[in-house]
Image (tube, rainbow, N blue to C red):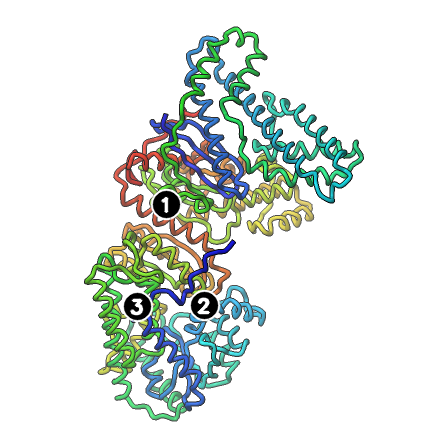
């Protein structure tokens, strides 16, 4: 099967979309950009392939009687089980890497005790891994670094205390290892992990086990479909750092414009709030970009700002919106300067303002700035599509809806749950066009 | 690991006119440094609305602080000067030409050519729409305590020059400017000498306009912004009215004509430009501290600037105005009244929209200057109006004149590339993309 790949190298995350010959999305993948776009591209692409495999499994399982009415649940199990396999594999890598760090003056005479502590840390990490991927388990993030990191630090602290060794020795080996591990995408081949995951699920369900090949065969078939990469297009801030030739690069403006049009064909205005750019884009009824405006040199009020705020408040990025939603009165914030974000925040807290009210004010401030960029690009014409990571934030969306209503009246506001992939989707469509030899602005 | 040596910008390929221009500028700086030795008086004055022919009638040399700032920007010394001025208390938002100048004075007034610049004997302030000019010369007057002439050019608020305005200008020239120049220089005014210079000016202006208009040809033989900045050097600076300028523009014209006949594009610092892919009109001054990097972002993508407003700041000649030896003072008045900075927003919009159409450009690009309110105020509105009138897309980037801290290369390149690709996409659009089938995903 031919596939067309779009990669969006954002400053915070890297996204990949895999498209088939009918321009249907086969899979999506995301990873943190980790200042290493080459790895980020590989990982995001691999994630998209995993997603694509699941999509192909879905297609081939659709008429399996044993799964009638519960294909979704089965695939959820399969995915979780697969993620667990992958997590365990990376854990092995992390353990080995950590062990190799136990050298030098710092560890002289303590090699054995640190080694034993590491044994224990990883035994515990492995033991609790299945809980992390249990049905309904909430994870702060889906990135290995975040999941493994927060658990490692927790467990290592307790282990160090019990063993009577300094915690920072364990911290040190982890810090030195995690970047290395992160920059090494999971090595094992996907198929065998999928098969291991399948076996795990089957072993837990006598009913499915009884169905045997009825379930196994279609999955094996789906895994065997070859995904030939026909063409790849990269977009986003990191695009120039990659060894992509010019034909394989498109600006994020074009990609977001086209991606938004593909998600919502009625789109005429797009607002994208990314990590370090806010873009207002006007597209014609065919998704061709007519005008755009971006923030100036200063990236105040972009997605990264919320990232800093989350760090300052010691919260997860995804927790900001829900907390702001609890606010009953929004605090007026004038500056959206990322550099001063921490100071602004502490200042407000010192004045006795509530965290949720401050957060509500911060969300309003970034949306106000975004609205100014949109108006510079030509205002909002029905329909209006909001994309980018910040579109997932309910508090930002609430403020946006209010301001759109106040300034432009009744406008249809589209937000796709997968809006973070808008740029990558547009890029995949450009990859498709390029492979067909179609012009940039052509109807595909 | 050894790195390939960075190409020295001095090795860049230059055509004859560029070498000639460089020699003229260098000669002028030598003259300035030798002014005291040679017994010549110096007038500091501004590019927009400069009265070079008149200044020459009194054997005086002109010293242009803006040009000094530009030259320091190109030589990457302005950054230190700007910071020096900030140390002296000038705010970050003040025009960086001013701060570069103040900083240079504070550090011994060594010119861009590496030799001391003379103290001026006279400050000839031609006020043409830029309020900062007045404040700048107030600072210089404080420093040098020399005579100052304030030639007040009425703003073209209604978009036209009236007889009243012209009369007011002539009255100032007769009653203020000339008597002061006579007093400072000790030279008696000779109107025939002025006529002679103006005759030279008109010849050079004719050739300059021919060169700028050559960009209507496809491909354009010149870049009317990055290249244009070299072309305007002599006539906007100390050479308008001189036989050298006439000769320079004559040979420039011949050179461009020959490129045009051969179907060649513009010369860039890396040689002849490749295929012309995009034709742009640019509004606003360039960034000088990263001038070549900025230019490269255009020629690497096949983008040529076919017309620009910046190359009109020292005189708008392409609508027919010429200095006129038969009406010397009137034409000096009309010249000052007509410079780009003295035109109101609707006039600027008219000019830019005309350029987009006449030069068959793909669109308008605004380089908005952070520290120049005079240029930047209203630019977004202008841009939208030009877009509306021409139906061509516009784009907006921001940088600064000579403050290196405000040139964010990645940011500007990103916007330019997006803009070029948007033009390309619009060009090839013959219909739409289909709606996406979202259900295809897992």
Q: Residue at label 2?
A: B73
Chain of the residue under the numbered disc 3 shown in the image: B
* Residue B222 vs residue A114, the one in the foreground: A114
* Residue A207 in view in this figure: yes
Q: Secondary structure at mark 1?
A: helix
Residue placed at 46% from the left, 9% from the top?
A: A214
Residue A107, picture quadrant: top right
* Residue B16 vs residue A409, the one in the foreground: B16
Chain of the residue under the numbered disc 1 shown in the image: A
Q: Which residue extends farthest front?
A: B1
Chain of the residue under the numbered disc 2 shown in the image: B
Q: Residue at label 3?
A: B15
> Quick one: label 3, few (<14), some, or many (20+) residues within 10 Å?
some
Residue placed at 41% from the left, 18% from the top?
A: A59
Instruction: Tell me the distance, in whole angstroms, between the alpha carbons under discs 1 and 3.
Output: 30 Å
Q: Position of residue B191 (x, y in %)?
A: 28, 88
Q: Secondary structure at mark 2?
A: helix
Name the quadrant of the N terminus of chain A.
top left
Residue placed at 42% from the left, 14% from the top?
A: A62
Instruction: Tell me the distance, in whole angstroms, between the alpha carbons under discs 1 and 2.
Output: 32 Å
Name the quadrant of the C terminus of chain A.
top left
Instruction: Tell me the distance, in whole angstroms, between the alpha carbons under discs 3 and 2.
Output: 22 Å
Q: Residue at label 1?
A: A246
Q: Which residue extends farthest left?
A: B261
Q: Position of residue A270 (x, y in %)?
A: 41, 40
* Residue A209 vs residue A73, the one in the foreground: A209
- Between marks 3 and 2 in the image, the one whose residue lies nearer the viewer: 3
B314 relative to B391, above or below? below
């Amino acid at each position: 099967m031919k596939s067309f790949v779009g990669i969006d190298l954002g400053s915070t995350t890297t996204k990949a979309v895999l498209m088939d010959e009918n321009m249907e999305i086969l899979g999506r993948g995301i990873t943190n950009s980790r200042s290493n776009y080459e790895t980020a591209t590989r990982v995001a692409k691999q994630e998209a392939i995993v997603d694509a495999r699941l999509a192909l499994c879905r297609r081939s399982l659709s008429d399996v009687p044993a799964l009638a009415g519960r294909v979704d649940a089965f695939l959820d199990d399969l995915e979780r089980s697969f993620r667990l396999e992958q997590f365990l594999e990376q854990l092995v890598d992390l353990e080995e890497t950590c062990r190799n760090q136990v050298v030098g003056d710092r560890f002289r005479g303590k090699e054995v005790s640190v080694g034993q502590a590491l044994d224990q840390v990883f035994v515990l990490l492995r033991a609790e891994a299945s809980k992390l991927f249990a049905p309904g388990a909430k994870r702060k993030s889906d990135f290995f670094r975040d999941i493994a990191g927060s658990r490692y630090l927790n467990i290592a602290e307790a282990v160090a205390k019990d063993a009577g060794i300094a915690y920072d020795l364990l911290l040190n080996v982890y810090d030195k290892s995690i970047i290395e591990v992160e920059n090494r995408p999971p090595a094992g081949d996907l198929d065998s992990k999928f098969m291991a995951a399948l076996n795990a699920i089957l072993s837990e369900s006598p009913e499915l086990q009884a169905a045997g090949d009825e379930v196994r065969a279609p999955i094996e078939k789906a895994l065997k479909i070859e995904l030939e990469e026909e063409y790849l297009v990269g977009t986003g801030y990191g695009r120039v750092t990659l060894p992509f030739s010019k034909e394989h690069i498109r600006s994020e403006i074009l990609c977001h414009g086209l991606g938004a049009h593909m998600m919502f064909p009625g789109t005429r205005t797009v607002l994208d709030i990314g990590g370090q750019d806010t873009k207002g884009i006007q597209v014609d009824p065919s998704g061709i970009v007519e005008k755009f405006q971006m923030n100036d040199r200063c990236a105040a009020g972009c997605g990264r700002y919320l990232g800093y705020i989350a760090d300052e408040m010691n919260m997860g990025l995804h927790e900001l919106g829900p907390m702001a939603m609890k606010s009953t009165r929004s605090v007026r914030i004038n500056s959206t300067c990322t550099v001063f974000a921490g100071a602004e925040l502490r200042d407000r807290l010192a004045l006795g303002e509530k965290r949720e009210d401050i957060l509500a004010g911060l969300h309003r401030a970034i949306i106000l700035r975004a609205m100014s960029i949109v108006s510079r690009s030509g205002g909002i014409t029905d329909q209006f599509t909001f994309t980018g990571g910040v579109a997932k934030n309910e508090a930002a969306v609430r403020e946006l809806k209010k301001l759109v209503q106040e300034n432009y009246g009744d406008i249809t506001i589209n937000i796709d749950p997968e809006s973070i992939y808008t740029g990558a989707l547009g890029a995949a469509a450009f990859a498709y066009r390029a492979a067909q030899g179609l012009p940039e602005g052509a109807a595909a | 690991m050894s790195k390939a040596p960075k190409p020295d910008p001095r090795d860049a390929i230059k055509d004859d006119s560029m070498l000639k221009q460089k020699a003229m500028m260098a000669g002028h700086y030598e003259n300035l440094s030798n002014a005291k030795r040679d017994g010549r008086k110096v007038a500091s004055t501004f590019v927009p609305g400069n009265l070079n022919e008149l200044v020459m009638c009194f054997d005086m040399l002109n010293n242009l602080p803006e040009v000094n700032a530009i030259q320091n920007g190109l030589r990457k010394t302005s950054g230190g000067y700007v910071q020096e001025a900030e140390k002296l208390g000038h705010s970050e938002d003040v025009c960086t030409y001013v701060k570069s100048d103040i900083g240079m004075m504070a550090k011994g007034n060594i010119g861009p050519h590496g030799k001391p610049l003379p103290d001026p004997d006279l400050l000839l302030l031609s006020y043409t729409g830029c309020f900062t000019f007045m404040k700048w010369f107030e600072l210089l007057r404080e420093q040098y305590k020399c005579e100052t002439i304030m030639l007040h050019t009425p703003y073209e608020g209604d978009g036209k020059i009236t007889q009243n305005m012209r009369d007011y200008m002539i009255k100032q020239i007769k009653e203020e400017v000339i008597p002061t120049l006579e007093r400072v220089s000790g030279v008696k005014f000779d109107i025939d000498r002025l006529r002679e210079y103006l005759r030279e000016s008109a010849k050079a202006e004719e050739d300059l306009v021919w060169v700028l208009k050559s960009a209507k040809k496809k491909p354009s033989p010149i870049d009317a912004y990055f290249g244009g900045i070299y072309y305007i050097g002599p006539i906007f600076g100390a050479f308008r009215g001189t036989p050298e300028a006439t000769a320079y523009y004559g040979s420039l014209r011949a050179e461009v004509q020959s490129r045009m006949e051969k179907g060649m594009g513009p010369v860039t610092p890396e040689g002849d430009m490749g295929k012309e892919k995009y034709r742009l009109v640019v509004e606003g001054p360039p960034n000088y501290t990263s001038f070549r990097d900025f230019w490269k972002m255009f020629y690497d993508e096949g983008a040529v600037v076919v017309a620009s407003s910046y190359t009109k700041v020292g005189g708008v000649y392409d609508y027919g105005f010429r200095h006129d030896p038969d009406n010397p003072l009137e034409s000096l008045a009309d010249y000052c009244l007509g410079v780009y900075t003295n035109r109101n927003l609707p006039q600027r919009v008219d000019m830019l929209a005309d350029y987009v159409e006449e030069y068959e450009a793909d669109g308008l690009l605004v380089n908005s200057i952070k520290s120049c309110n005079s240029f930047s105020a209203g630019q977004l509105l202008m841009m939208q109006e030009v877009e509306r009138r021409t139906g061509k897309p516009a784009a907006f980037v921001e940088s600064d004149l000579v403050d290196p801290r405000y040139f964010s290369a990645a940011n500007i390149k990103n916007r330019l590339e997006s803009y070029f690709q948007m033009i390309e996409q619009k060009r090839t659009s013959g219909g739409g993309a289909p709606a996406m089938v979202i259900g295809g995903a897992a």
